[in-house]
Image: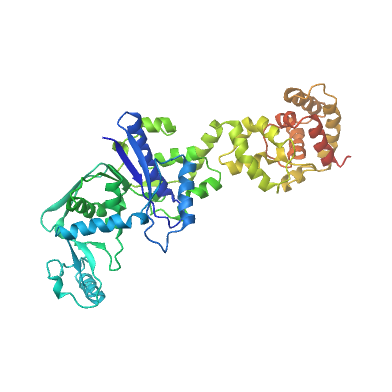
Amino acid sequence: MTVVTRFAPSPTGFLHIGGARTALFNWLFAKHHEKTGDGGKFLLRIEDTDRKRSTGEAVEAIYDGLQWLGLEWDGDAVSQFSRVDQHKAAAQRLLQAGKAYHCYCSPEELAEMRDKARQEGRPMRYDGRWRDRDPSEAPAGVDPVVRMKAQRQGETVIEDLVQGTVRVANDQLDDMILLRADGTPTYMLAVVVDDHDMGVTHVIRGDDHLTNAFRQSQLYQALDWEIPAFAHIPLIHGADGAKLSKRHGALGVDAYRDLGFLPEALRNYLLRLGWGHGDDEIISTEQAIDWFGLDGVGKSPARFDVAKLTNLNGHYIREADDNMLVSLVLPEISKILQGNLAEQADSRLKKGMPSLRERAKTILELSELSAFYAKIRPLEMNDKAAKILDDSARIHLGALRTDLSATDRWEAGILEETARHYAEANDLKLGKVAQPLRAALTGSTVSPPIFEVMEILGREESLGRLDDSLGST
């Protein structure tokens, strides 16, 4: 049997972090079975039947978010709205088989049922008054809905691959609506028909859908279709244990990209939200595909912690390819410098990236830390740098400039030795020379080792920046 999973988001906004984790688990499960020889497919269905809320921009945001995360789907994405005829046909099959019926309840009758349920302190359940009633009794001018005849005796049992055995008494389930009065299918019908027609074997989704699974199981049985395996994963909570919200960092995937997170870091972090492999924290995509199984999914809600994600992102930045990092920071630096980049910006950044990446946890931080390499002279000093460059510091820098310009090779070790000799000759600690030098050459008080910076900038640029800070021409 080929394992087929699916991700089925509603295009009513961005791809949120919970949806991204659901997509990742489905993708990994399919990829794992594909690699082990069982065959695996990961399908994408856009549940766009809500035409008022579904937008083309939201659909594109889902595509973009999944592709950025590296979760490519198999085949073309399926539009649920385009399959309305198949949904209606399934409802007609049930009507013809006597497993569904037309219900002519008025809004007033339904309101009366809700009021009675509220007074009795129980959930609203349709009372089945049209279940076995002769359609000839239908009131004139009322467009009926189509309801499924739910099982009334016994219980519905699901052997969930995460939650274990879960069951509900059938008398707790009422006759759900399949087609609305205007003939449009409901979510419950559309999902079952689509999953069946797409050959989905494993439905992996949030446990907020667990109650839906009971009704959907009965619908599969009524249609004489094989029920897929269900796996309902616990939802994500905030670090404080409360339901995940924007205040916990529950942003869209696109926002994390814009904030400077790497897709491999976010994948790794989402993987560890509710799934584990021993004590492993850093898990590559290849390892994840090898190891992933639903038996590793916990039953308790995972807690989303932006600080942990940020630290993990720092690890992936330190492990990343320098050229790739440069390609990511250059556009951000261009924004910082309003497009005014030095011609040598790219080459300097490539040389400086090994040190720069050790200090950053996001691409935005890395861009801010490395922007000085791309600046055009004269540099603008921040307040701390300007404060360091007082009259005393300028006097020492002026004298040190003479010594530096006389060095035969512009290399970090030689430049540091030159500065050290000057400091010792003037009874100064090296920091009293190095910090003003850093301020003059970077416009900041924070940078990689300043003598390494000088080597990367080169003799001409370094001396030019010194001259600028000294007011020389």
Residue 66 point in image, percent of width and height: 45, 44
Residue at 17% x, 50% y: name it: 221
Q: Quadrant of the C terminus?
A: top right
Q: Is residue 115 above or below residue 76?
A: below
Front in this rendered view, residue 142 or 117? 142
In the picture, measured across the screen, residue 48 lies left or right of residue 337, that is left
Residue at 40% x, 49% y: name it: 19
In the picture, measured across the screen, residue 154 lies left or right of residue 10, that is left
In the picture, measured across the screen, residue 9 lies left or right of residue 160, that is right
Front in this rendered view, residue 435 or 25? 25
In the picture, measured across the screen, residue 245 lies left or right of residue 101, that is right
Residue at 26% x, 74% y: name it: 107
Colour scheme of the picture: rainbow
Q: Residue furthest right?
A: 473
Q: Which image quadrant is residue 6 in?
A: top left
Residue 387 point in image, percent of width and height: 76, 46
Q: Which image quadrant is residue 80 in?
A: bottom left
Front in this rendered view, residue 60 or 208? 60
Residue 454 point in image, percent of width and height: 75, 31
Residue 200 makes an appearance in the image: yes
Q: Is residue 340 above or below residue 344?
A: below
Residue at 78% x, 31% y: name it: 428
Residue 29 makes an appearance in the image: no
Residue 346 point in image, percent of width and height: 69, 35
Q: Is residue 105 above or below residue 247?
A: below
- Counting every numbered tag in the picture gives 0
Q: Residue furthest left?
A: 153
Q: Residue furthest top?
A: 408
Q: Quadrant of the N terminus?
A: top left
Q: Which image quadrant is residue 285 in?
A: top left
